[in-house]
């Protein structure tokens, strides 16, 4: 009897102690001022390794934004498409070789293709938490039930992301932490595994008026109208316009991978007055549809309105946040517009000497203007030729192909894309990266078509892993293909004799 009384008392005490937590879960955690009774729901929620959900340890592959991250899986993955060569044949594998994670229960403001208030803050918050796992920490992704589920696009896994900072012993639920910190709106919050806790965390963030619920202006968001700027000024003074909306004019010379490439030729740059030099930048329009796509067609001279943003994966700046065309207000400053339709691209893909492209000595110098303490100040910015050509079309001739790496299915979805290493006549090394190229019969063009041959190439300059390369997205952008051994012209020595006999 005494033992029973002790158990009963202990149970009642436990029940009393849990009342505040239960009340908080019902939305009463905060007082009128919103902060007096703050509850750390992230600290309360624990990762249960014994549950029937799918779990997988991963490492960071790529930070995308606040609610999307790409992960590489650790060995013995159970995710389709992420374990071995045969996995890549799985019909239910949304990605090949890695996992695109779409965080469950949250929706952070956009910060990539479209730019929204607090989007950058959310992206930075997610990145900062995951980065704490470097050098000794760990990340575990968890499904919502007993199987790996994908989103409506079929390309991303719907996941809970748990992280354990280096030196810590407990995992923290990052989805919940993003909600609790006020960096996200809810997305199907109650309809998931941790619904009650997630809803309480969201309600608390809203009552405490955190970040997206603050009603304040985002210091990282540009609220002003477009700044008119030339491509030359933009490319040589990019940081002055970073995260601001600009309006720039030029001709669209290429369009692939949801990006249009706009450029202009300049005849007022020292050393290039006679032939001129092209300066350009990629315009990432993401999944915008409708009239914008026809405006950004190759050969159109256009005006583009967008945000100048640093693209972390590529390591360069691009113009993004392209808006749908406002048909009801043609004067909307966010509209992209056609200045002249079908002007062509005669000035594009200008021939560049490999020696100039590879040189670090031959610079392109441009005078730019900045406002310092309310006064305009000019300075000369000097870039190497390849730096100045970033995002711009060009062509090169007589490149000898020495090595080709072909992306295979074990490593990427871009099976058949090639990285071609070439040597120019002056000894310069030029790198070419292709899309998956196909011949007139629809067959994938393989390395045999170019290896140990001399080619001519057209493409757009891109930056990859710190190196500059020429990106070719069309099969007809690589021509030539004369085998190097034919340079000996052994057969030509017989032509006079053959000709004499025929006569």
Image (cartoon, rainbow, N blue to C red):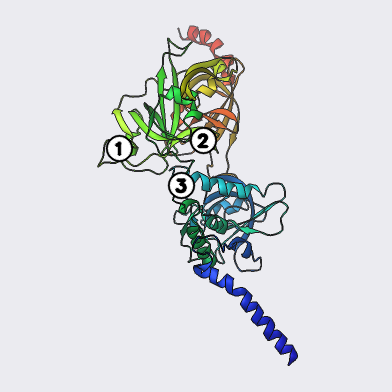
The residue wearing badge 2 is 310
Mark 3 or mark 1, earlier in chain: 3
The residue at 48%/66% (across/down) is: 190
Q: Is residue 289 or residue 180 the one in the foreground? A: 180
Q: Is residue 282 or residue 105 the one in the foreground? A: 105
The residue wearing badge 3 is 110
Q: How far apart, in angstroms, are the residues tagged by discs 3 and 2?
A: 14 Å
Question: Residue 408: which disc?
Answer: none
Q: Quadrant of residue 47?
A: bottom right
Q: Residue furthest right?
A: 2
Mark 2 or mark 1, earlier in chain: 2
Q: Residue furthest bottom?
A: 1
Nearest to the eye among marks 2 and 1: give it. 1
Q: How far apart, in angstroms, are the residues tagged by discs 3 and 1?
A: 21 Å
Q: How far apart, in angstroms, are the residues tagged by discs 2 and 1?
A: 25 Å
The residue at 69%/81% (across/down) is: 10
Q: Is residue 193 or residue 473 the one in the foreground? A: 193
Residue 369: % across, % down: 46, 21
Disc 2, SS:
strand
Neighbour class for label 2 at 10 Å: few (<14), some, many (≥20)?
A: some
Whether tag 2 and tag 1 are in contact, CB under 8 A, the answer is no
The residue wearing badge 1 is 332
């Amino acid at each position: 009897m005494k033992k029973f009384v002790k158990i009963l008392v202990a149970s009642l005490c436990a029940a009393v102690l849990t009342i505040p937590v239960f009340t908080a879960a019902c939305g009463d955690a905060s007082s009128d001022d919103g902060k007096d009774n703050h509850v750390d729901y992230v600290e309360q929620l624990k990762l249960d390794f014994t549950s029937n959900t799918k779990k997988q340890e991963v490492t960071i592959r790529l930070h995308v934004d606040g609610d999307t991250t790409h992960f590489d899986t650790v060995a013995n993955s159970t995710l389709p498409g992420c374990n071995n060569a045969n996995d890549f044949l799985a019909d239910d594998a949304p990605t090949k070789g890695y996992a695109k994670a779409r965080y469950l229960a949250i929706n952070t403001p956009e910060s990539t293709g479209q730019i929204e208030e607090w989007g950058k803050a959310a992206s930075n918050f997610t990145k900062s938490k995951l980065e704490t796992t470097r050098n000794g920490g760990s990340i575990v992704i968890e499904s919502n039930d007993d199987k790996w589920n994908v989103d409506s696009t079929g390309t991303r896994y719907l996941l809970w992301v748990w992280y354990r900072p280096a030196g810590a012993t407990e995992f923290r639920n990052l989805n919940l932490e993003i909600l609790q910190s006020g960096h996200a709106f809810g997305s199907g919050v109650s309809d998931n595994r941790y619904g009650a806790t997630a809803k309480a965390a969201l309600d608390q963030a809203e009552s405490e008026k955190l970040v997206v619920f603050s009603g304040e202006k985002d210091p990282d968001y540009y609220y002003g109208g477009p700044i008119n700027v030339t491509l030359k000024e933009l490319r040589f003074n990019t940081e002055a316009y970073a995260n601001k909306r600009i309006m720039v004019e030029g001709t669209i010379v290429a369009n692939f991978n949801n990006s249009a490439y706009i450029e202009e030729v300049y005849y007022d740059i020292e050393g290039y007055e006679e032939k001129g030099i092209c300066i350009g930048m990629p315009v990432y329009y993401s999944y915008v549809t409708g009239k914008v796509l026809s405006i950004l067609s190759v050969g159109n001279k256009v005006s583009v309105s967008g945000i100048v943003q640093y693209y972390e994966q590529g390591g360069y700046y691009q113009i993004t946040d392209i808006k749908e065309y406002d048909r009801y207000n043609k004067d909307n400053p966010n509209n992209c517009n056609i200045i002249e339709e079908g002007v062509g691209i005669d000035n594009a893909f200008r021939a560049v000497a490999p020696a100039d492209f590879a040189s670090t000595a031959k610079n392109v110098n441009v005078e730019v203007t900045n406002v310092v303490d309310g006064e305009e100040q000019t300075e000369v910015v000097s870039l190497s030729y390849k730096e100045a050509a970033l995002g711009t079309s060009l062509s090169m001739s007589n490149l000898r192909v020495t090595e080709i790496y072909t992306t295979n299915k074990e490593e990427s979805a871009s099976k058949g894309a090639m990285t071609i290493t070439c040597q120019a006549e002056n000894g310069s090394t030029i790198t070419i990266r292709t899309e998956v190229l196909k011949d007139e019969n629809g067959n994938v063009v393989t390395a045999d078509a170019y290896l140990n041959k001399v080619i001519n190439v057209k493409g757009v300059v891109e930056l990859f892993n710190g190196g500059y390369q020429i990106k070719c997205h069309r099969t007809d952008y690589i021509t030539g293909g004369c085998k190097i051994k034919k340079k000996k012209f052994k057969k030509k020595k017989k032509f006079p004799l053959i000709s004499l006999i025929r006569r």
